[in-house]
Image (cartoon, rainbow, N blue to C red):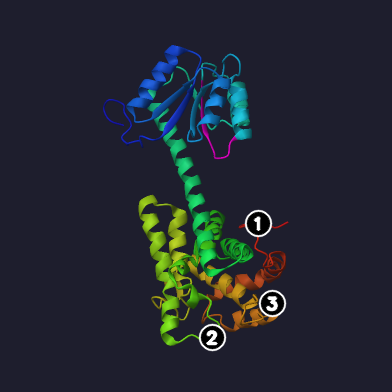
């Protein structure tokens, strides 16, 4: 904050805030401070008018509402917003009643945060900044989903393949978080790695379709061209990461660029070896290899689980990190179950297992 109590950041002029307040003086106060900070402010005198406004303008994602109002009060408004919303709407409640029961009721119905009247402009500003961060997270996840689908369309992968990569990666990462403390993985990071793992082949959008689906043996030049997908994918995600600094995208960039590196240093694109390969890429390398080995292709019937297991164990310390192989062996029953559960059938992404 500067010496005048203003927040030291700039707001996008297109951001809209809906003020829901039956007292005209309070609406004027809120409008003044929000407009000064670059918001486009829309007003409603009660919950009913607010609902009609939200239905007419889906770009409104931030709501500041009183609780005690005529026609429809703030409690009912919160409840209806949560029932009807398509995209998440951040709800900041303001009221003169500071008792715990009021706060608990509003929050339990779906309010995100709470302010007590009289409202301090600085506090209002900072709490809405929190709302902005939450909405950005939602946009990051939407972007990840879109990029994953884009890569799948180019390489003609099924939703089931992406489901399997997500679940294989999740199982390995969670196992390593529990059993290999030296890696420094937490269960939270394990979930993030799994969430972005289907982006590993994003770079295939930059490879000629004819080359991606060629059934004949590839020439040395064609192999080199195909291997460029890791640089393409890593570069695309790096550009987005530079603008967002999202932890999700940092992991996604490492996975896309480095999931074809090998533990023995004979992989690509850089020939990294051992611990110099990020653990997220080492995990996805095994998950992707297992799925490739056990999947039916136009040029291959696919290996059985037992045959794939033998290949993975035989390449421990060569292609694969021995700790990741050990995690695979601890979880191989789950790998078999996932392979069966998510057969190739054009499914949607990230289905949960029963």
Q: Secondary structure at mark 1?
A: loop
The residue where tag 3 is placed is 305
- Name the front one of labels 3 and 2: 2
The reply to whether the C-beta atoms of the residues labelled 2 and 1 are less than 8 Å apart is no
User: Local crowd at mark 1 within 10 Å, few (<14), some, or many (≥20)?
Assistant: some
**Which of the 4 image quadrants contains residue 309?**
bottom right
Task: Give the left or right position of residue 308, taking residue 194 as reference.
Answer: right
Residue 331 placed where, x, y %?
A: 66, 68
The Cα–Cα distance between marks 1 and 3, rounded to whole angstroms, is 22 Å
The reply to whether the C-beta atoms of the residues labelled 1 and 3 are less than 8 Å apart is no
The Cα–Cα distance between marks 2 and 1, rounded to whole angstroms, is 34 Å
Task: Give the left or right position of residue 296, taking residue 213 as reference.
Answer: right
Work out which residue is located at the far front of the displayed protein and give it: 210
Residue 57 shows up from this direction: yes
Residue range (magenta) = 85-94
Residue 100 shows up from this direction: no
- State yes or no: residue 91 in magenta: yes
Q: Secondary structure at mark 2?
A: loop
Q: In this rendering, is residue 65 above or below 227?
A: above
Can you tell which mark lies on residue 216? Answer: 2
User: Local crowd at mark 3 within 10 Å, few (<14), some, or many (≥20)?
Assistant: some
Task: Give the left or right position of residue 246, taking residue 74 as reference.
Answer: left
Q: Secondary structure at mark 3?
A: helix
Which of the two labelled residues, at mark 2 and mark 1, occupies the earlier sequence position?
A: 2
Can you tell which mark lies on residue 351? Answer: 1
- Name the front one of labels 2 and 1: 2
- State yes or no: residue 45 in magenta: no
Residue 353 placed where, x, y %?
A: 69, 58
Looking at the rendering, in which quadrant would you find the C terminus?
Answer: bottom right
Residue 286 placed where, x, y %?
A: 56, 73
């Amino acid at each position: 904050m500067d010496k005048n109590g203003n927040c030291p950041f700039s707001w996008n002029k297109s951001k809209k805030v809906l003020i829901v307040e039956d007292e005209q003086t309070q609406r004027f106060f809120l409008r003044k401070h929000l407009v000064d900070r670059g918001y486009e402010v829309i007003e409603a005198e009660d919950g009913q008018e607010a609902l009609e406004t939200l239905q007419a303008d889906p770009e409104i994602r931030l709501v500041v509402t009183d609780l005690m109002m005529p026609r429809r009060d703030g409690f009912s408004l919160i409840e209806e917003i949560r029932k009807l919303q398509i995209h998440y709407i951040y709800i900041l409640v303001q009221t003169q009643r500071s008792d715990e029961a009021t706060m608990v009721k509003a929050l339990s119905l779906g309010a995100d945060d709470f302010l007590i009247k009289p409202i301090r402009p600085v506090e209002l500003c900072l709490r809405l900044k929190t709302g902005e961060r939450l909405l950005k997270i939602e946009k990051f996840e939407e972007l990840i989903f879109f990029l994953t689908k884009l890569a799948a369309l180019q390489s003609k992968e099924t939703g089931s393949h992406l489901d399997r990569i997500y679940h294989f990666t999740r199982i390995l990462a969670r196992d390593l978080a529990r059993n290999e403390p030296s890696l420094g993985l937490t269960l939270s990071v394990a979930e993030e790695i799994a969430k972005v793992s289907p982006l590993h082949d994003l770079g295939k959008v930059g490879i000629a379709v004819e080359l991606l689906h060629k059934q004949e043996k590839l020439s040395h030049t064609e192999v080199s061209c195909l291997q460029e997908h890791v640089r393409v994918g890593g570069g695309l995600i790096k550009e987005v990461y530079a603008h967002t600094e999202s932890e999700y995208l940092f992991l996604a960039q490492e996975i896309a660029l480095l999931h074809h590196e090998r533990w023995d240093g004979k992989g690509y694109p850089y020939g990294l070896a051992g611990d110099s390969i990020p653990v997220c890429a080492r995990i996805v390398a095994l998950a992707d290899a297992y799925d490739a080995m056990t999947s039916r292709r136009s040029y291959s019937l696919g290996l059985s689980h037992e045959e794939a297991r033998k290949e993975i164990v035989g390449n421990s310390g060569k292609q694969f990190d021995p700790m990741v192989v050990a995690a695979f062996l601890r979880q191989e029953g789950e790998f078999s179950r996932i392979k069966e559960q998510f057969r190739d059938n054009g499914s949607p992404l990230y289905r949960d297992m029963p």
